[in-house]
Amino acid sequence: MRVGAKFNVAWVTVYITLVGLFLVATRAIPAPQIGRVLFRRRGYSADLADIALDQGRCFVAPIPIYVVSDAEAVSGLQLLEDGALLGPAGAMHADIREQGGGRYSHWGPWIYFSSRDGSDPRSNGRKYSVRER
Amino acid sequence: MISELIRSRLADPKTGEPLFFDGEAFRSSTSTYPIVNSIPRFVENDFYAASFSFQWSKYQHTQVDIYRDDQASEQELISKTGFTREEMARKLVLDAGVGGGRFAEVVSRWGGEVVGTDLGNSVQIARDLLQDRDNVWIAQADIAAMPFLPETFDAIFSVGVLHHTPDTKAYFRKLVPLLKPGGTIAIWVYPNIGAYAVRKPWINFVNKIPIKAYHDWCEWFMATALKRKDSPLFNALWRSFPYPRDTNGFEWNVLDLFDSYSPAFHGIHSPEEVRRWFQEAGLVDVKEPSPKYPTCMRGRKPLR
C-alpha cells in the first residue's frame, strides 16, 4: 500500500470511529453490543405498531434492525400481551401460523407472533409490547 | 439512428422551447448547450454528483455484464423494473441516471432505443462503453430540468438514482411528464428499513471525507472485513455500519461500500410512500415488480 494511502486509511479510520462513537452516544445508529456495554444502555422496549397479518394465526410487526434477532444470533426479545409474557420464543414460523398460542419468533427486522387465544391482535383490544432482556 | 430521432424531441431545460442543432451545439432562442467529447451537456458541471463521477471512472466495467461475462446487471434490471427484452425492443427508453451505463447496455442489447442521462461526469464512461451502438444516445443532464419535450418516451426507468437527488419524490414527478400515454415508468429507491436506514445518519459525516481518501479506506476496510467474515467484532460492526457482504467479488464490494456512504443525498422511503407517488402522479397498473425489492414500483400512464 502506498504511503499516502496508508495515511488516508489511518486518519479516516480515526474519523469514522469518532463519528461512530458520537452516533452511538446520540442513539442515531444502533450498536446492540457495543452501545450497551459502553453506555450501559437499557435494552429495546416498545409497544408493537403497524401489525399486519402474515398467514393463519401469525401476525408480523416491525422491529428495528439493530435489535439482534434469531437470524443473526440469539434474540433477547420478549413478547408481552397486556403485560403477560407470551411464548415459546424462537418458534417455527409454520407452527406460529398453524398453532398460534402465543408462539413468536424474532427474525430479521420483524417479529412473527400470535395471540394467546388465536384472536386478531389488531382488533382484540389487547396491548402487545416487546422488551429486550 | 436514435440521435436523429431524439434531436427532434429535445427542449431547452430552462424554457421548454424546442432546441435546434447547428452542427456544433444545441441552441434555443436564449441558451446554448455545447457538445463536449461527443456528449451534449445540458448542465454546467456535476454539482452534487461528484462522488458518482469518481466511482464510475474508477469502476468502469465492474458491473457491466459484457465485461463480467455474466447477467448480474440484466437480472437486477429485470428484478427491479419487471422490464423484459420483448417489452423494451424497439421502444424509446429513458435511463434516468445512467451512471457508467450498465443498465443502458442491457436495454440496448435487448433492442431498445436508449437515451441515457446523468448529472455526473460518468456520462463519459457510459458513452465510451456504448459508443459503438447506434441505438444509444447519452447526454449530461439534471433530472430536475430534462432536455426533452413532454411525452417523448415509451418507457422510463431510474434504478438506484432518485434517492440520491435533493428530493426523491419531486425528482420522480419530473420524469412522469416525459412518458408517452400508455408508457411505463419503473423506479427503485432505497427502502426505509434495514441497512439503508442504519446508513442514513452516517451519510452527512462520511460524505465530508475527501473522495480519494475515503476510497483508499474502502479498499482497506473491505479487504480486512472479508478476511474476518466470522469475527464477532465485525458482525457487531456490520449492525452499526452495514457494509456489503455479498459474493459479486471484491471490486464490486468496494464499489458498493463507497457508493453506500459517499453520496450527498441518501433518501429512504417506504413501499406505501412510493406507491402513493405513483398514484398521485395519475399512473395506473401500479405494482411492485418483485417481492424481494418492495420499494421497486412500476406504473403506466393511462391513454387519453
Image (cartoon, coloured by chain):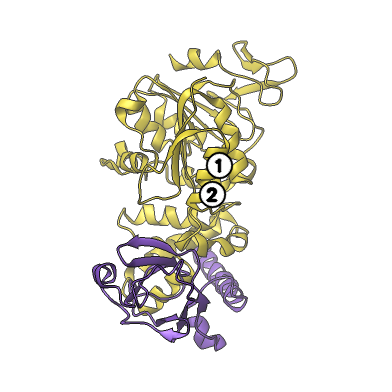
Question: What residue is shown with label 1?
Answer: B277
Residue type at numbered disc 1: Trp
Direction top: furthest residue: B22
Q: Residue at point 51% right, 73% down?
A: A30
Front-most of B171 and A126? A126
Horizontal and vertical percent position of residue B172: 56, 38
Up-down relation of residue B247 to residue A125 (above or below) = above
Front-most of A103 and B146? A103
Label 1: how many residues lie within 10 Å, few (<14), some (14-19) or many (20+)? some
Front-most of B200 and B288? B288
Task: Give how far apart the Cα atoms at labels 2 and 1 are.
Answer: 6 Å
Horizontal and vertical percent position of residue A121: 43, 70
Total numbered labels: 2
Colour purple belongs to chain: A
Front-most of B131 and B96? B96
Residue type at numbered disc 2: Glu
Colour yellow belongs to chain: B
Q: Tell whether label 1 touches label 2 (CB within 8 Å).
A: yes
Dot 2 falls on which chain?
Answer: B
For the question of whether residue B120 can be seen, the reply is no
| Label 1 residue SS | helix
Q: Quadrant of residue B140?
A: top right
Q: Quadrant of the N terminus of chain B?
A: top left
Q: Is residue A49 left or right of residue B89?
A: right
Dot 1 falls on which chain?
Answer: B
| Label 2 residue SS | helix
Label 2: how many residues lie within 10 Å, few (<14), some (14-19) or many (20+)? few
The circle on residue B273 is 2
Horizontal and vertical percent position of residue B47: 65, 42
Q: Residue at point 56% right, 32% down?
A: B175
Q: Is residue B236 left or right of residue B33?
A: left
